[in-house]
Image: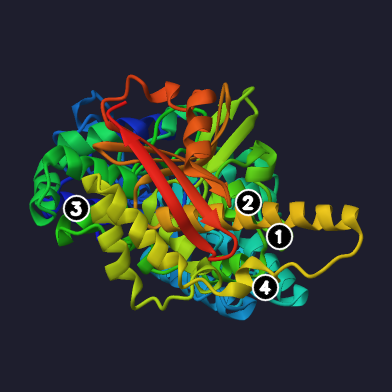
Amino acid sequence: MGEHNFRDLREGGFLYVDKTQLVYELIELGKFIFLSRPRRFGKSLLLSTIESYFSGEKELFADTWLGRQDLQWQEFPILPFDMSQSSGRDSEVMALFLNKCLADYEQEYGLEDNSGLKDVGARFSFLIKGIAQKTGKKVVILIDEYDNGILETLDAPKKEQDAMSAVLRAFYKQPKAMTRYVRFCMVTGVARFGSYTLFSGPNNYLDVSMNPDLAAICGITQQELLDNFEEGIQKIATERSESREDAIDDLRQKYDSYRFTRSQAKVYNPYSLLNAFVEGALDNYWIKSGTSKVFVEYLTRSEFDLLELEKIKVTRERMEGKYSKTDTIPLLFQTGYLTIKEVENFDLFRLGIPNGEVRSALVNQLMPTFMGISEERFPEMLSRLQRLLKSGDVDGWIKEIQSLLSNIPNQLFGPRQSHVDDEKKRTEAKEQSIARFERTYHLLVHVIFQMLSVDARSEISVAGGRIDMVVGTHRFLYVMEFKLDGTTQEALKQIDDKGYLLPWQTDHRQLYKIGIVFSSVDRNISAYEYQTNL
């Protein structure tokens, strides 16, 4: 959902969130530009906007920032390439696709047919030079989804990976080689191109992916949401029978909080947001539009702790690294399943899951392992749990969690303790068992809350220690402490003694402190106690 052709969008009278000032600032940065963003985040619309600018189509920019500037509008020959139109399944298919694109442009500009050239790169260079000499103007080159072939062959044999790289390298290095004939060249994709040897001298391209001044060039900011989408917000509120404020909070929890730079600027997923306004429902539109097979395969074969995934700290080099089977972090960050949460010491980044939609995607991958419940039964159970959580019905939502936990396969908890004669080993085995049980229970409850599009955080560090879990809705805040085979009084006392409530004393929401006891025998919540109006 959402028009990705700038001309069609403007001539069709569709709503356009004005990004033209950022577009102009990007163009002024240099001749060769690279931008990485997750799929369906507006990269194609951005390139289409740039295409209209370099086509001299001033009339399309009426009532925009760029249209109000005193500029000399010029028309340049433009070569757009949408690499996603190729299946990318092997090097021969990619070469055929590129040659077809080049043949079309040769015909369009009345140039010699160079189909006899075996080297796709040489054919591209002749095209650039030929157009510039024939028109007397430098060429604008726009390459969208440059990494399609690389991603599609990521798990292919090395021989095929090398063959694909050879074809793409021969093609992509030409803009630099023909720089005297190039006015502007922009490349977009998901993977950070600096990690791949596709470009001859990649330092020739300015990577603006983490430029703080361009943080909001793709995506919708909170202010842009409020300024442009009042009708959509009201539609969500009406369909969900809730207030405007609750609808805005639900949208934020579900689709917001992508952060790509050191800047504090966060953006919504534009694809999901626009679909939500059309449908009047908060669904996982981005996920359903096509999860990368590469992501699924890597996630399935990787072993990582979902709790650790929420607070991992990495360097910029690691975030921008090449995808590998041993490190999923570059893949998860670059594809949008992780985002920047905090920046420490300028070059250390704490990553986390952006929002409810992405959490749902991750949880759905883990569901067969963690939950003994079919996907058909999940929507109704989760909808009921979310409704109880947002209404402040603690007894109701804890009972729902008990029902969910009762479906967990016993083998997930590991084997029961066997008899050990040695007292020291018996003590060590017991401690390990307790640690495993506590971790498993905590993870399971965390996973359940991750499905609900609410603000759920685990193991939060405060001055007095670590809070097991805090869950927030628009009107309620739940601070929880878990105990294995303990008492609710112990849990509540720990919340008080360690000052776990202090960070939220001035919060406008109704505050609950909740002590929850898990039983290693029943393998479920055996007791709970809560207090409110604190």
Distance from the alpha carbon under mark 4 to that under mark 3 = 38 Å
For mark 1, what is the residue? 324
For the point 60% across and 65% down, the residue is: 299
Comes first in the chain, label 3 or label 1: 3
In this view, the residue in front, 55 or 380, is 380
Disc 2 secondary structure class: helix
For mark 4, what is the residue? 155
Q: Is residue 359 left or right of residue 410?
A: left
Q: Is residue 337 visible?
A: no
Q: Is residue 33 left or right of residue 504?
A: right
Distance from the alpha carbon under mark 4 to that under mark 1 = 10 Å
Disc 4 secondary structure class: loop
Distance from the alpha carbon under mark 4 to that under mark 2 = 16 Å
Q: Are marks 4 and 1 in contact (CB under 8 Å)?
A: no
Amino acid under disc 3: Leu
Q: Are marks 2 and 1 in contact (CB under 8 Å)?
A: yes
Of labels 3 and 1, the one closer to you:
1
